[in-house]
Amino acid sequence: MSVDELVFLPLGGSGEIGMNMNLYGFGPAASRQWIMIDCGVTFADYRTPGIDVITPDPSYILEQKENLLALFLTHGHEDHIGAVAHLAADLGCPVYATPFTAQLVEGKLKEADIDIDFRVIKMGARVEVGPFDLEYVTLTHSIPEPSAIAIRTRLGNILHTGDWKLDPSPTLGPVADEDALAAFGREGVKAIICDSTNILSPGESGSEQGVKDNLTELIGAQTGRVFVATFASNVSRVVSICRAAAAADRSVCLMGRSMLRIVAAAQAVDLLPADIGFVDPREAGFIPREHVLYLCTGSQGEPRAALARIARDDHPDVTLNDGDTVIFSSKIIPGNEREIFDLQNSLVELGARVITEKDADIHVSGHPNQDEVRRMYEWAQAEYAVPVHGEARHLKFHAEFART
């Protein structure tokens, strides 16, 4: 006799950070129906020379893709959406995403000339596919519209957190929907599949409001031109920098392809406040030095990014001068140290003052520290905790933490 089972199968993103792809299955082994959550890439490093990005291996689900009901995207970071344009046509299922995430994915699909069944849903939407009843639950993170997905089935409920944090005062978008999380917990949760990125860090991850306040003070104190490097996908940080620039009577110029692309996506879904505007690089060149701020890609030392080109004196519109200030409103992602230090040395050699998150509180993580994870567990009251989105040391510590 065949017996229905509820199955969680990560094809990427467990035992590693990046390349997230998760399957949830329901039914007997011979005729199981599946949904997929996220479809991301990881970026190559010294261990994979000649390769730019790596996708998860989808062969397991491709062999039974007629049973794959849908792909759901939790948010728009590359490690969660970057493989959609590579794999979605082969997967052959509908893809669901909230408006901002959809803008980012649709741009990639258009660039690759790929047409799929793409379905844009509202924040907090509820979708039923086969034996699965899914609800998007609003959280906070370092990109707009992050969502956990509450999965209801006959055999039990699962909370898939995606990437998240608990920011009490975000500068863009709502706070986490604590009521919805607690209500789902009261229904009974079989398992929580939870982000492990910052599980080694005690306390809380910090708020974007504090970063905004510190950037406002820091930018206001500068006298020459100001360059700020940050992650382009952190739209709330972009807004904070624009507000800080306005307070210092500086016009903002966007530098870098991904910065332009992501800001355009945010504008397309009305995420950016209407009073925020930008000047183009040529116009910025005629603005007095004390009245302009350049918002740049390249915080990780990427050689083709805007800031690296400026540091090489290789940019057609911008030249760095003695007395300018370069602010890194970002952290160093492990593995990028050499590239970032080389970039910062080049900037200093050109006469710039370099300020990083080690010098001032101008960056916070988008992932939960221990106190936030503890609160999530209190809401979910799950029978089982399944740590994901981390390397071996994160997962092992998270498992021990969840038992306490």
Image (spheres, rainbow, N blue to C red):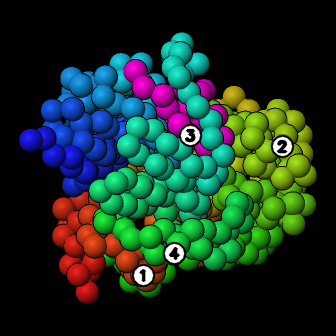
Q: Where is residue 190 in the image (x, y as percent from the top left)?
A: 31, 66
Residue 89: image location, x then y, percent: 42, 18
Q: Earlier in the sequence, mark 1 or mark 3?
A: 3
Is residue 1 in the magenta section? no
Q: Earlier in the sequence, mark 4 or mark 2?
A: 4
As drawn, 376 above or below 30: below
Q: Mark 4 points at which residue?
A: 182
Of the image marks 3 and 2, the number of the one nearer the N terminus: 3
Is label 4 or label 1 in front? 4
CA gap between label 1 and label 3 equals: 28 Å
Which residue is rendered at x = 25% and y = 86% of the image?
Answer: 404
Q: Name the residue under label 3.
A: 97
Residue 92 percent across, percent down from the top left: 40, 21
Q: Do the residues labelled 4 and 2 touch (CB within 8 Å)?
A: no
* Quadrant of the rendering where the N terminus is positioned: top left
Q: Where is residue 386 shown, x and y percent of the image?
A: 26, 64
Q: What is the crowding at mark 4: few (fewer than 14 residues within 10 Å), some, or many (at least 20)? A: some
Q: Distance between the residues labelled 2 and 1?
A: 44 Å
Q: Give the range drawn in magenta.
A: 92-108
Q: Which residue is most to the top?
A: 113
User: Badge 1, how many Cα within 10 Å: few under 14, some, many 20+?
Assistant: few
The residue labelled by disc 1 is 378
Q: Which mark is residue 278?
A: 2
Residue at x-position 23% and y-position 66%:
395
Q: Distance between the residues labelled 4 and 1?
A: 8 Å
